[in-house]
Image (cartoon, helix red, strand yellow):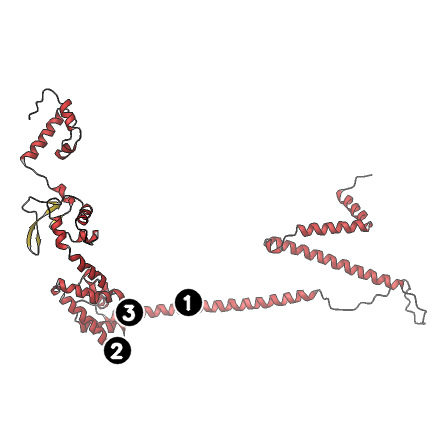
Amino acid sequence: MMAKSRAEIMRDYRKRMKEDPERYREYLAQARNRKRKNYVAAEKLTKKEKEKRSEKNKEYLSRHRQKKKLERELETARRDLDQPTPESSGYDTGRSESTPLVVDFQFPNRRNGPRRRVSNALAKKQRELRRLKAENEEMRLKYQRTLRRLQRYKKIEKKTDESECSTQQEYEESLNINKALTPNSKTKRMMKMAKLSREQRSKVHKQLLFSFAVQNQMKTEKRGIKPTEKGSLRTHIGSILKKYGLKKTVSKNTGLSRNCLNGLSIRDITRRRETMKYKQKVIDFLSRDDNSRSNPGKRDKVKTPNGKEQTRTLTDYMKNLYQKFMSENLTVKLSLSSFCKLRPRSIKLSAFITRSSCLCTKHQNMSLSARALRGCGLNLPINPEEFVKYERVNHVLENEIPDSIKVGQ
């Protein structure tokens, strides 16, 4: 006897299980619980896994329907066999009594209903897709036609503008509005470039003429503006130009610098007035001999409104001098930036002190003596300023100086 395969063993096992109803019900309950426990929701599956599950469900459903159909047919046949046979009426069909009569009724197949609905919906969507594709193609062609038409209009407009000007130089001047033109000519040129109608020209002519006239007047009178008048110019005009972003345009057309047109607030003017009260006090403080020293050269002079003044160089940084000034004047309220702004041109910063060197006899003898000591092998600096600041000078001169050198008193 040949050994059974695994499929045959499982088939026999299931057959024995089905013969015992109680055991078969327990097996089905366990199988349902196991499947319910391991079930994964469709929303968590991938597209491929969803399709696979759908195919399996269709297969199970088809098999279940075939099974039910077969059961119904067997039940009908069994019912017909169990019915009693009626007496013969003389109109026998010649059919044996053991064979059941089968009548075929042509009822519509209800299973095809969902398929037909899905097919109709799919055909409807396909027709709509074809319609949208046709509309999209039509809109694309319309866009290309409009784009080509716009390009032709731009070419015609460019040729028209170039034909209005006899030469390329005149064409560029018409675009940039030549500065040599009068305000009236500039106004007419700009309106011609804008291609305004007669009604539109009448509305904007006065406004354009006024702006060009004001710019021309400011340009011609800019050299005559005094420093005292520039403050009022900043106060009244600078804030308006800054608001509308016209400072660069006005500066280009009038020649006035943008700093001249910068607007000042009332707070800035008030602070400047308070700062100017301490100007003379700051100048006197910086001019003191303990804070600065006078430069000895004849050319160390600068021009000031009061004439030429000899320059001085600060002996310390401005920050340290500011702290010294505030400690001496406790009632003064002044910031470091304002203190630095009040420094006059004739007083140079401490960075300029390295440019001045004294060539008197005393300093030169000191420098030559330091070189001679360095030449004898002593570890001393050559620079006189560093020589004075060196801490070990006395120790070196007392202990390390050779006997061949005699030091005078």
Residue nearest the observer in this picture, 397 or 327: 327
**Amino acid tagged 2:** Lys
Q: Residue at x 25, y 77 (%)?
A: 201
Quadrant in the rendering for residue 403 = top left
Q: Whole-percent x and y of residue 222?
A: 14, 65
Secondary structure of the residue carrying numbered label 3? helix
Query: Cα distance, mark 3 to mark 2?
Result: 28 Å
The residue at which mark 2 appears reads as 203
Residue nearest the observer in this picture, 397 or 290: 290
Secondary structure of the residue carrying numbered label 1? helix
Q: Which residue lies furthest to the front in this view?
A: 331
Q: Whole-percent x and y of residue 263?
A: 22, 63
Residue nearest the observer in this picture, 142 or 288: 288
The residue at which mark 3 appears reads as 159
Which of pointers 3 and 2 lies earlier in the amino acid sequence?
Answer: 3
Q: Do labels 1 and 3 touch, CB within 8 Å?
A: no
The residue at which mark 1 appears reads as 144
Q: Residue at x 47, y 69 (%)?
A: 138
15 to the left or right of 323 = right
Q: How crowded is mark 1: few (under 14 residues within 10 Å), some or many (20 or more)?
A: few
